[in-house]
Amino acid sequence: MSEIASVAALILAAGSSSRMSHGHHKLLLPLGERPVLAHVVEAALQSQATPVIVVLGHQSSQVAAALSSYMNHNKLNVQKNPDYRAGMSTSLRTGIQALAQYPGCAAALVMLGDQPFVSTQLIDRLLSAWQQSGKRIIAPCYHGKRGNPVLFDASLFSELVAVSGDEGGRSVITRHADEVEQIELSDALAQHDVDTWEAYQAALTIWQSQQTT
C-alpha cells in the first residue's frame, strides 16, 4: 500500500442541525439530485483517501438511508456515535477509534459533512502535501484564513481522541502550530457550509450557477 493510499477520510456527520430552521436536517437537504452529505461522501470515495469513515448521530437511520447507494463501496465504513449530543469531539473520537481496524492508516483527513463543495481534487491535493511536506498537519488556507478539511498524521491520533466538548482538532493544531503546513487556495467555495437556511439557499444558487457554466 502506498503512503497516499493509507490516508483515511473521516467525515463528521452526526450533528443535530441546531442552527437550521424549519426543523430540517441540513445533511439531508437536496442539492442537485443528491442530499448535501452525499456530495461530501462521493468526493471522498473518488479521492485517493481510504478508508472513508462516516460518523453518524442525529437521525442516523435516515442519514444512512440517504447514503444507501454508497453502502456497498469497499472504501466506506459507517459508524454511529451515540454520544453526539456531547459535541463534535465525540464524533471525532468515534472516527479515530474506528481506524483501529486499519493498522496501515498513516493519517486522517477530517472533513465536515455540511461542506458539499469540497472536491476530490482538493482532497488529493492535501494528501499529496502531507506526503511531500513531512509536516504532521496539513490545512487549507483561504485568503489567509485557515479552513477545512484538515489532515492529521497518525502520531496525533491519541491527542485527537483526548479532545472534549464541541470542538474538532483546533486545540491540537494550536499545540503543534510549528508542524502545520498551510496550502493556500484561491477558491474559497469549499468552505461554504450549509449550517443555516440562508446558507442552504446560497448553496442552491451556487450549485445552479455551476450547472449552467
Image (tube, rainbow, N blue to C red):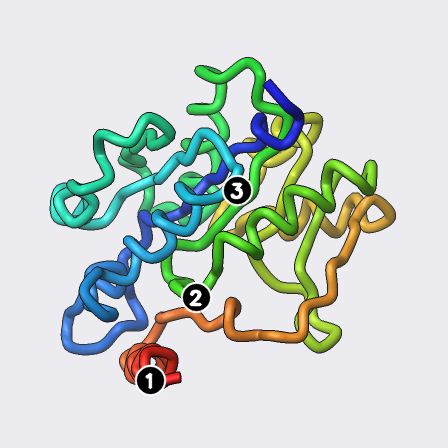
Report the amino acid beneath label 3. Answer: Ser
* Tag 2 secondary structure: loop
Please state the horizontal and vertical placement of residue 9, each as a whole percent of the image.
49, 39
Q: Nearer the viewer, mark 1 or mark 2?
A: 1
For disc 2, the marked residue is 117
Residue reaching furthest right?
Answer: 178
Mark pair 2, 3: CA separation: 28 Å
Name the one closer to the observer, 160 or 202: 202
Which disc is residue 59 wearing? none
Residue drawn where x is 59% and y is 36% of the image: 160
Instruction: Tell me whether the residue at label 3 lies in contact with that at label 1, contact meaning CB atoms closer than 8 angstroms.
Output: no
The residue where tag 3 is placed is: 164
Residue 163, given in percent of the width and then of the height, sits at 57, 40
Q: Nearer the viewer, residue 93 or 52?
A: 52
- How crowded pointer 2 is (Cα within 10 Å; few <14, some 14-19, many 20+) is rated as many
Residue drawn at (30%, 77%) of the image: 200
What residue sits 48% from the left and 50% below the top?
A: 111
Query: Can you give x and y, in whole percent of width and height, for residue 206 in the image?
Result: 38, 82
Q: Earlier in the sequence, mark 1 or mark 2?
A: 2
Q: Is residue 51 left or right of residue 123?
A: left
Q: Which kind of residue does numbered mark 1 sit on?
A: Thr
Task: Please say if 106 is above or below 119.
Answer: above
> Which badge, 3 or 1, is on the more N-terminal residue?
3
Which numbered tag is attached to residue 212? Answer: 1
